[in-house]
Image (cartoon, rainbow, N blue to C red):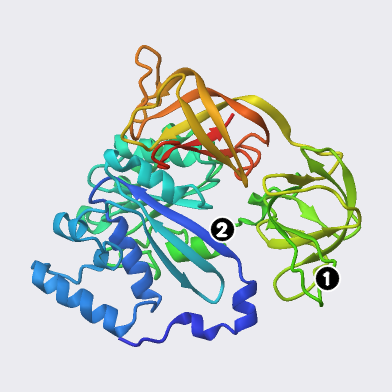
Amino acid sequence: MSNQSTIETVDTKAYLDMDLLRFTTAGSVDDGKSTLIGRLMYDTKQIFEDQMDAIEESSKKRGDENINLALLTDGLKAEREQGITIDVAYRYFATPKRKFIIADTPGHIQYTRNMITGASTANLAIILVDARHGIIEQTKRHSFIASLLGIKHLVLCVNKMDLVGYEESIFEDIKKQFDEFSSRLEIADIHYIPISALKGDNVVDKSSNMEWYAGGTLLYTLENVHISSDMNHIDSRFPVQWVIRPHSDQFHDYRGFSGRVESGVFKPGDEVMALPSGFTSTIKSIHNYTEQLEEAFAPMSVSITLNDEIDISKGDMLVKPNNVPQQGQDIELMVCWMSPKKLQPNGKYTIKHTTKNARCIIKEVYYKVDINTLHRIEDNLEIGMNDIGRIRIRTTEPLFYDTYKKNRATGSLIIVDEFTNETAGAGMII
């Protein structure tokens, strides 16, 4: 096995300028998520010889008939012993067309919070279905979570087609079942691919066993899915993370505001408003680490200087005066609860929203969601670990926010247990 990666065929500048696609895998236990990622990386020559030797050795010790490619991502001892994924595993690779970050997430219902963590920044979700079992509750659950998290692209991979004789009718039946279910989700772009992660059919190379399938392989789909329009380039939002004052002879008067552009576009000369003060100024310059820029857009990390001296600090936000976010202290959100300690009605928590920290109280719990049937549960409002529900909070100071559907960055927040400093929940503003 050669250790030469396809990334070596890409020159450095082209590599840095390439699109980055973040995607997550989800599905029921033993549907083959980790094996699929292992196959994807193996067939694109992303695995080095020493990694391959270690995987082969581990496979022999376990008594596996074939090389167990799932061991590439399942690194925890408990994962290898049980043959399941427990925590999120991240892997990175690139082809001449695009860079990728993969989040391999667990399938068990008790690890829903881990699945949410891995999927929260994804552009695309791969949902695996066992061809022998078809659409099951966990398929619906993970698809609903992907929709809830604002993932705009979904690939339904019908796996283990080799175990059903590569039958077209089985694939078509599963596709029809999912079409009916997905009409209730807010995911517009759905692709269906019949694969065998174990054998490699339609993962990187076209399968000779399924000539009836006229679509692209999984890798082709990942390389060509259109994500540039997924970013919000209309609503300009720049949460300030840090104020840069070098106090050096070379930059004696420099005062820059650093952070990440969460949406929209900023250019020198643009009029901007600082929130919460409401004072306005114009942009003097925009810099990254090495050079001055003509524009900055999501998700670039930059430093912005202004032509006027305005009191701006961490947690403030620069926006365009004619397009400001919502402002409020009473906020409704869908919350994914991550703490073993149940959500406490009227409980006090710390929240982190963009670069701003504040405190809040849980004012009301409206309902929780049965994530297998998508039905609302209103007669039992206890929200425990891995539950998803709709709540209302009251914050100690106003937040500047957009709805999560409109802007994932300014429409999300983290709820923190102020006594243990543990992340208790992830919220999506409605």
Relative vertical location of residue 264 with respect to residue 61 in this rendering, above or below = above
Residue 79 pos. (x, y %): 21, 57
Say which residue label 2 marks.
225
- Residue at (54%, 77%) from the top-left corner? 96
Relative vertical location of residue 11 with respect to residue 222 in this rendering, above or below = below
Q: Which mark lies nearer to you, 2 or 1?
A: 1
Crowding at mark 2 (Cα within 10 Å: few <14, some 14-19, many 20+): some
Residue 189 pos. (x, y %): 55, 46
Q: Residue furthest top?
A: 379
- Residue at (22%, 46%) from the top-left corner? 132
Find the distance from the CA under tag 2 to the CA under tag 1: 47 Å
Which quarter of the rendering shows the C terminus?
top right
Which quarter of the rendering shows the N terminus?
bottom left
Q: Amino acid at mark 1?
A: His
Q: Amino acid at mark 2?
A: Val
- Residue at (34%, 88%) from the top-left corner? 2
Q: Is residue 83 left or right of residue 125?
A: left
Residue 288 pos. (x, y %): 72, 69
| Closest to the observer, 286 or 226 | 286
Residue 368 pos. (x, y %): 41, 23
Q: Quadrant of residue 374?
A: top left
Say which residue label 1 marks.
252
Numbered marks: total: 2
Element under disc 2: loop
Residue 404 is marked as none
